[in-house]
Protein backbone atom coordinates (compact mmCIF):
# COMPACT_ATOMS: atom_id res chain seq x y z
CA UNK A 1 0.00 0.00 0.00
CA UNK A 2 2.81 2.42 0.89
CA UNK A 3 4.50 1.76 -2.47
CA UNK A 4 1.30 2.61 -4.33
CA UNK A 5 0.97 5.90 -2.46
CA UNK A 6 4.62 6.75 -3.06
CA UNK A 7 4.38 6.10 -6.82
CA UNK A 8 1.17 8.09 -7.02
CA UNK A 9 2.79 11.04 -5.24
CA UNK A 10 5.85 10.87 -7.49
CA UNK A 11 3.63 10.92 -10.58
CA UNK A 12 1.66 13.85 -9.18
CA UNK A 13 4.88 15.77 -8.46
CA UNK A 14 6.12 15.15 -12.01
CA UNK A 15 2.80 16.37 -13.44
CA UNK A 16 3.08 19.57 -11.40
CA UNK A 17 6.68 20.07 -12.51
CA UNK A 18 5.69 19.63 -16.17
CA UNK A 19 2.76 22.00 -15.74
CA UNK A 20 5.02 24.70 -14.31
CA UNK A 21 7.82 23.95 -16.78
CA UNK A 22 5.59 24.53 -19.81
CA UNK A 23 4.98 28.14 -18.76
CA UNK A 24 8.70 28.89 -18.76
CA UNK A 25 9.04 27.29 -22.20
CA UNK A 26 6.14 29.45 -23.40
CA UNK A 27 7.93 32.52 -21.98
CA UNK A 28 11.04 31.71 -24.00
CA UNK A 29 9.02 31.07 -27.18
CA UNK A 30 7.00 34.28 -26.69
CA UNK A 31 10.14 36.29 -26.07
CA UNK A 32 11.69 35.13 -29.36
CA UNK A 33 8.53 35.67 -31.39
CA UNK A 34 8.11 39.19 -29.96
CA UNK A 35 11.75 39.91 -30.74
CA UNK A 36 11.14 38.91 -34.37
CA UNK A 37 7.95 40.97 -34.60
CA UNK A 38 5.62 38.01 -35.12
CA UNK A 39 2.00 39.05 -34.52
CA UNK A 40 0.26 37.34 -31.61
CA UNK A 41 -2.65 36.48 -33.91
CA UNK A 42 -0.38 34.12 -35.91
CA UNK A 43 0.30 31.76 -33.01
CA UNK A 44 -1.23 30.34 -29.85
CA UNK A 45 0.46 28.74 -26.89
CA UNK A 46 -1.52 26.32 -24.69
CA UNK A 47 -4.81 26.83 -26.55
CA UNK A 48 -6.00 25.68 -29.94
CA UNK A 49 -7.15 28.49 -32.23
CA UNK A 50 -8.49 27.91 -35.71
CA UNK A 51 -6.55 30.70 -37.42
CA UNK A 52 -3.15 30.26 -35.74
CA UNK A 53 -0.22 27.87 -35.43
CA UNK A 54 -0.74 26.23 -32.03
CA UNK A 55 1.65 24.71 -29.48
CA UNK A 56 -0.08 22.73 -26.74
CA UNK A 57 1.18 20.42 -24.02
CA UNK A 58 -0.74 17.23 -23.35
CA UNK A 59 -0.22 14.09 -21.33
CA UNK A 60 3.38 13.27 -22.11
CA UNK A 61 3.48 14.92 -25.51
CA UNK A 62 3.54 18.23 -27.32
CA UNK A 63 1.05 18.97 -30.11
CA UNK A 64 1.72 21.36 -32.95
CA UNK A 65 -1.02 22.20 -35.39
CA UNK A 66 -1.23 24.56 -38.33
CA UNK A 67 -3.84 27.14 -39.11
CA UNK A 68 -7.32 25.70 -39.22
CA UNK A 69 -6.28 22.73 -37.08
CA UNK A 70 -4.71 20.99 -40.06
CA UNK A 71 -1.53 18.93 -39.95
CA UNK A 72 -1.58 18.13 -36.22
CA UNK A 73 1.65 16.48 -35.16
CA UNK A 74 2.44 14.93 -31.77
CA UNK A 75 5.99 15.11 -30.43
CA UNK A 76 7.49 13.41 -27.40
CA UNK A 77 10.58 15.62 -27.46
CA UNK A 78 10.35 19.33 -26.59
CA UNK A 79 13.08 20.31 -29.04
CA UNK A 80 11.41 18.51 -31.96
CA UNK A 81 8.14 20.22 -31.07
CA UNK A 82 9.77 23.65 -30.93
CA UNK A 83 11.48 23.08 -34.30
CA UNK A 84 8.16 22.04 -35.88
CA UNK A 85 6.41 25.06 -34.33
CA UNK A 86 9.04 27.53 -35.58
CA UNK A 87 9.02 25.90 -39.05
CA UNK A 88 5.30 26.58 -39.30
CA UNK A 89 5.61 30.14 -37.98
CA UNK A 90 8.55 31.38 -40.03
CA UNK A 91 8.19 29.35 -43.26
CA UNK A 92 11.81 30.34 -43.96
CA UNK A 93 14.70 28.02 -43.13
CA UNK A 94 17.16 30.74 -42.07
CA UNK A 95 14.69 32.49 -39.74
CA UNK A 96 13.61 29.14 -38.31
CA UNK A 97 17.21 28.17 -37.65
CA UNK A 98 17.90 31.48 -35.91
CA UNK A 99 14.77 31.11 -33.75
CA UNK A 100 15.63 27.53 -32.75
CA UNK A 101 19.22 28.52 -31.92
CA UNK A 102 18.00 31.41 -29.79
CA UNK A 103 15.53 29.08 -28.05
CA UNK A 104 18.24 26.51 -27.28
CA UNK A 105 20.53 29.19 -25.86
CA UNK A 106 17.72 30.60 -23.69
CA UNK A 107 16.91 27.14 -22.30
CA UNK A 108 20.36 27.22 -20.70
CA UNK A 109 19.00 30.08 -18.57
CA UNK A 110 16.01 28.04 -17.31
CA UNK A 111 17.38 27.54 -13.77
CA UNK A 112 17.70 31.31 -13.35
CA UNK A 113 14.37 32.01 -15.08
CA UNK A 114 12.54 29.57 -12.83
CA UNK A 115 13.48 31.53 -9.71
CA UNK A 116 10.74 34.04 -10.46
CA UNK A 117 7.17 33.48 -11.67
CA UNK A 118 6.48 32.78 -15.33
CA UNK A 119 5.06 35.71 -17.30
CA UNK A 120 2.87 33.40 -19.40
CA UNK A 121 1.55 31.64 -16.31
CA UNK A 122 0.71 34.95 -14.61
CA UNK A 123 -1.10 36.19 -17.73
CA UNK A 124 -3.10 32.97 -17.88
CA UNK A 125 -3.99 33.16 -14.19
CA UNK A 126 -5.04 36.80 -14.57
CA UNK A 127 -7.24 35.98 -17.57
CA UNK A 128 -8.88 33.01 -15.82
CA UNK A 129 -9.48 35.03 -12.66
CA UNK A 130 -11.01 37.89 -14.67
CA UNK A 131 -13.31 35.41 -16.44
CA UNK A 132 -14.42 34.02 -13.06
CA UNK A 133 -15.09 37.55 -11.78
CA UNK A 134 -17.13 38.39 -14.88
CA UNK A 135 -19.15 35.17 -14.55
CA UNK A 136 -19.82 35.82 -10.85
CA UNK A 137 -20.90 39.41 -11.53
CA UNK A 138 -23.27 38.19 -14.24
CA UNK A 139 -24.67 35.51 -11.93
CA UNK A 140 -25.14 38.03 -9.12
CA UNK A 141 -27.16 40.31 -11.40
CA UNK A 142 -29.58 37.44 -12.02
CA UNK A 143 -29.69 36.00 -8.50
CA UNK A 144 -27.76 37.76 -5.72
CA UNK A 145 -26.34 35.61 -2.94
CA UNK A 146 -23.95 35.86 -0.03
CA UNK A 147 -21.77 32.99 -1.30
CA UNK A 148 -21.28 34.70 -4.69
CA UNK A 149 -20.48 38.02 -2.99
CA UNK A 150 -17.80 36.35 -0.89
CA UNK A 151 -16.30 34.54 -3.89
CA UNK A 152 -16.35 37.75 -5.92
CA UNK A 153 -14.57 39.62 -3.14
CA UNK A 154 -11.91 36.88 -2.81
CA UNK A 155 -11.38 36.72 -6.58
CA UNK A 156 -10.91 40.49 -6.75
CA UNK A 157 -8.27 40.37 -4.01
CA UNK A 158 -6.54 37.47 -5.80
CA UNK A 159 -6.66 39.32 -9.14
CA UNK A 160 -5.19 42.43 -7.54
CA UNK A 161 -2.35 40.33 -6.10
CA UNK A 162 -1.65 38.69 -9.48
CA UNK A 163 -1.53 42.07 -11.21
CA UNK A 164 0.84 43.45 -8.55
CA UNK A 165 3.08 40.40 -8.97
CA UNK A 166 3.14 40.95 -12.75
CA UNK A 167 4.06 44.61 -12.34
CA UNK A 168 6.69 43.90 -9.68
CA UNK A 169 8.40 41.10 -11.65
CA UNK A 170 8.00 42.29 -15.23
CA UNK A 171 7.02 45.97 -15.07
CA UNK A 172 3.80 45.14 -16.94
CA UNK A 173 0.36 46.39 -16.03
CA UNK A 174 -2.66 44.47 -17.20
Image (cartoon, rainbow, N blue to C red):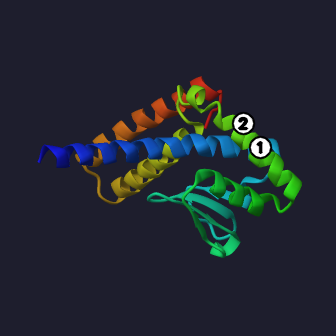
> Can residue 37 be seen by looking at this rendering?
no
Left/right placement of residue 141 relative to residue 61 reads left
> Can residue 113 be seen by looking at this rendering?
yes
User: Residue 39: image x %, image y %?
Assistant: 77, 53
User: Residue 56: image x %, image y %?
Assistant: 56, 58
- Where on the picture, by quarter, is residue 90? bottom right
- Which of 88 and 101 lies nearest the eye of the viewer? 101
- Which of 155 and 9 lies nearest the eye of the viewer? 9
- Where on the picture, by quarter, is residue 93? bottom right
Q: Looking at the image, which residue sits at the far front?
A: 3
User: Residue 157: image x %, image y %?
Assistant: 40, 33
The answer to whether residue 42 is above or below residue 157 is below
Quarter of the picture holding the C terminus: top right
Q: Few, some or many C-alpha atoms within 10 Å of disc 1 (few <14, some 14-19, many ≥20)?
A: few
Left/right placement of residue 91 relative to residue 26 reads right
The residue tagged 1 is 101
The residue tagged 2 is 105
Q: CA distance from mark 2 to mark 1?
A: 6 Å
User: Residue 8: image x %, image y %?
Assistant: 25, 48
Q: Element under label 1?
A: helix
Number of numbered markers:
2
- Which of 12 and 121 lies nearest the eye of the viewer? 12
Amino acid sequence: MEDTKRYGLEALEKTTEISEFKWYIFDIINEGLEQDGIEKSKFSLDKKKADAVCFTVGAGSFSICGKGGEAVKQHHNIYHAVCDFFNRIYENEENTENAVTRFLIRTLDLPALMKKPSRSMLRDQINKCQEEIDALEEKMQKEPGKKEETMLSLNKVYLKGLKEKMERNFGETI
